[in-house]
Amino acid sequence: MQFGSDNQAGASQQVLETLLQANTGFTHGYGEDQWCAQATEALKTFFGCELDVFFVATGTAANSLALSCLVQPWETILCHHHSHILLDESTAPEFFSGGARLVPLTHQAGKLESRHLEHFFQNVSPEIPHTPSAKALSITQTNEAGQVYTVEEVATLSTLAHDHGLHVHMDGARFANAVASLACAPADISWKAGVDVLTLGATKCGALAAEAVIFFNRDLSENFIHRRKRSGHLISKGRLFGAQFIGWLKDDHWLDLAKHANSKAQQLADTLETFSNIQQVWPCQANELFLIMSEQLSESLQTAGAEFYQWPVTALPAGTTLKQNEVFVRLVTSFATTDEHITEFCDRIRNFVL
């Protein structure tokens, strides 16, 4: 009953085997090796374009270093009110950017929508140098509510941002799950839709620790090598990143892993839909489910060994509130989720007696 996070699963066998291959012999360090070179070429093929790519170990480093290339310390980054960069990275984006402020645009909305951006631009009137001006928009794909931005939604948001002089960053920690959900090409929801820089995460989808910062607007990457080194995120044995991405990308392995996670989430959602004591907050679009249940049921499931997290009520959409003794929880499936995880979890709910 492991639904805590896709971070809690290990690495896929194919990724591990590629790591073992890369472990033999000698090669140059700091990413100047054949494994990183092959991974870079594979990513160019993956997206179908020229790009600059830099590997790091964590999503926080990827997002924060990417954003630091898009803004000056006196500028701002627009984002969703429950974006990971705002709530779960301990002010790292502000730290790495030298102080650029994150500005949430939404409230009680599952997605960042064009109306939120339009409202911001209609009402903001910066008085330079007294007030900060917006310089970047950050979108999460798949987002923090488990929702997927369509090709059209990404393109609309990117166009609005570019029309007002902003760069567009995409937090792609679950990018693979979004591509699998939309059945589109990776390019369709990235550079073709106007994204300037993408942080592509493999860690949540079958790798051990592998994140790629991908600049489609290559003019923005000029200082990244210095920012990565200065922040301590340039590792000497860079082949460990390159090998993971090679194994992850080979024969569309990434897509198989993401499809499995998504299908298990949908399987779980379909069964939970039959229970009157479970309310699904948003439709299942990728590999995350958000539920409302009684506090007693939640405690019973966790006592029985189920792994999942309570979620902040501030993330609830407009019109949805908790009754007394109810809790709001998140469940996440992964490439390692099994039918047995789902069956046991649902049987526990079916047999629950208050």
Image (cartoon, helix red, strand yellow):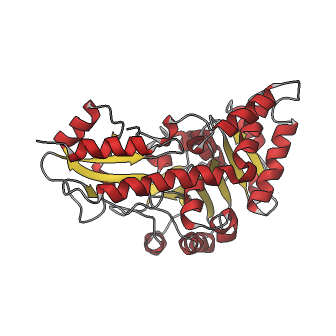
Residue 146 position by quadrant: bottom left
Q: Quadrant of the C terminus?
A: top left
The front one of 348 and 280 is 348
Whether residue 312 sits left or right of residue 264 in the image: it is left
In the picture as drawn, the residue positioned furthest to the top comes out as 25
Whether residue 148 sits left or right of residue 222 in the image: it is left
Which percent across, then down, holds residue 56? 68, 38
The front one of 192 and 85 is 192
Residue 116 position by quadrant: bottom left
Residue drawn 21% across and 36% down? 300
Which percent across, then down, holds residue 21? 80, 31
Whether residue 167 sits left or right of residue 6 in the image: it is right
Residue drawn 43% across and 64% down? 111
Which percent across, then down, holds residue 207? 63, 39
Which percent across, then down, holds residue 5? 45, 41
The front one of 308 and 144 is 308
Residue drawn 50% across and 47% down? 85
The front one of 196 and 317 is 317
Where 138 falls versus 293 (above or below)? below
Q: Quadrant of the N terminus?
A: top left
Whether residue 103 sits left or right of residue 108 in the image: it is right
Where 17 falls versus 24 (above or below)? below
Where 218 falls versus 307 (above or below)? below
